[in-house]
Amino acid sequence: MAYAQSQFESFHNTILFGYDSSKELRERRDTLLNDLKNNISGDAPAYQTFYQGSYALDTGIRPLDGNPDMDIGIIFDCSPEDYADPLKLKKFVHDALERHNRSVTIRRPCVTVTYYKDGVATHHIDMAVYSVNANDQTNIAWCRSTTPLADREWVVSEARELSDAINDRFEGDDRNQFRRVVRALKRWRDQHIGHKNTPSIGLTVAAYKWFSPRYDAMDGKPRDLVAIRDLVDQMLAYWGLRLNVHLPVAPHSDLFERMSDKQMEDLKGRLVALRDSLNEAAKQPDTHEACKILSKQFGEDFPVPAKVDTTKQTSAGVSVSGRSA
C-alpha cells in the first residue's frame, strides 16, 4: 500500500501560510495596529485586540489567487446597549485606518483593509468589531455602511472561545496532523468548489468534530491519507438531507446554512470522489501512481515523485491506528 506520507508532508509545507514568516503581512499588521492606536477618535471607547480565524488556529494556506488575509478582532470596552447603532464603532475603525496607499471598506462582518500593487490586490486584513454584553459574551457589529439603521445589529459571536476550543482539542503530534489535514481539505476545496458558501471554517469545525489522528500500528508514523479518508467518511456518515456543522460556541449556527441544495449535492458528490480517490491511492503498490491520483484531488502542489524513486510497498498486515488526544 502507498500512503505517500512524505508527499503529504511536502505538500503541507508548500501550501501552508505561516503569518509570522510573512514579513510583508506582519509589517502591515503592525502598521495598522499602530495607526488604529494613534488615530482613532478620542470619542471611541478603549479597546483591546486579538487574533482570530486561521491566524489564531495556525491553519492558514497560501490562496490560489495570491491574496492572503489575516483576521483581527477589536473588542471595545462597551456594551451593545451603549452603541445601539454598531456602525458608529466600525466608522471609528474605518476613519482611523483610511490612507492613500490602501482601501478601507466597511463590510457586514468586518472592516477590510486591502493593499494593491499595480492595481491588483496583494493581501488584505479583516478587522472585526466587538462589544461585550451583560453575559460576558462578545457581540460582533453586523452591518455594512449602506445597511439601513433598522437592520444594523449586534450578533453574539464567541470568536476567542472558538479558537480556544479548536486549539485545545488535540495536542502534540495529533494537533500537527489535525492542522495538516485541515490545510489539505482547504486546498482541496479551493481546487474543486467554485463558490464561497463552503467556508473554510466549516471544514475546520467538521475536523474539530470528526477528525481522529491516524498512525501506523507498526512504526508509529502518521498516516495523513487515512486520517483524511476517515474524516471524509465521517462527514458522509453524518449526512442527512444536508451536512450540518454547527459552531461549538455561541451562536451555534450551522456553518453551511448558506449553501443551496444544489451546492450541497455538489459538495457531497465531490467528497465521495475524494474518498474514493484516497482509497484508490492507498491500494497502489507504487507511490508514483498513488500521487498521480492524489494530485488530481489536491492540485499541482501535491508532488508526484519519479517512478524510479518510489515502489516502497508497506508490509502486508500493517494496520493503521489512532491515538487519543
Image (cartoon, helix red, strand yellow):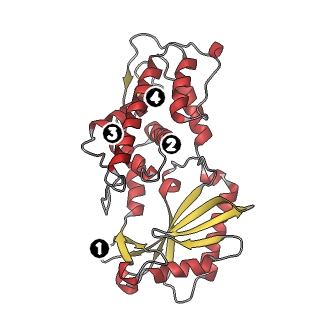
Q: Which of marks 1 and 3 is in front?
A: 3
Residue type marked 2: Arg
**Residue named by callout 4:** 225
Q: What residue sits 64% from the left and 73% below the top?
A: 34
Task: Tell me if 84 is positioned left or right of 135 in this view.
Answer: right
Upstream in sequence: badge 4 or badge 2: 2
Asked if disc 4 and disc 2 are in contact, CB closer than 8 Å, the reply is no
Could you tell me how far apart the alpha carbons at marks 4 and 2 are, in whole angstroms?
Answer: 13 Å
Labelled disc at residue 135 = 1
Upstream in sequence: badge 3 or badge 4: 4
Pick out the residue farthest to the top: 316
**Residue named by callout 3:** 235
Upstream in sequence: badge 4 or badge 1: 1
Labelled disc at residue 155 = none
The reply to whether residue 255 is in sight is yes
Could you tell me how far apart the alpha carbons at marks 1 and 2 are, in whole angstroms?
Answer: 34 Å
Upstream in sequence: badge 1 or badge 3: 1
The reply to whether residue 223 is in sight is no
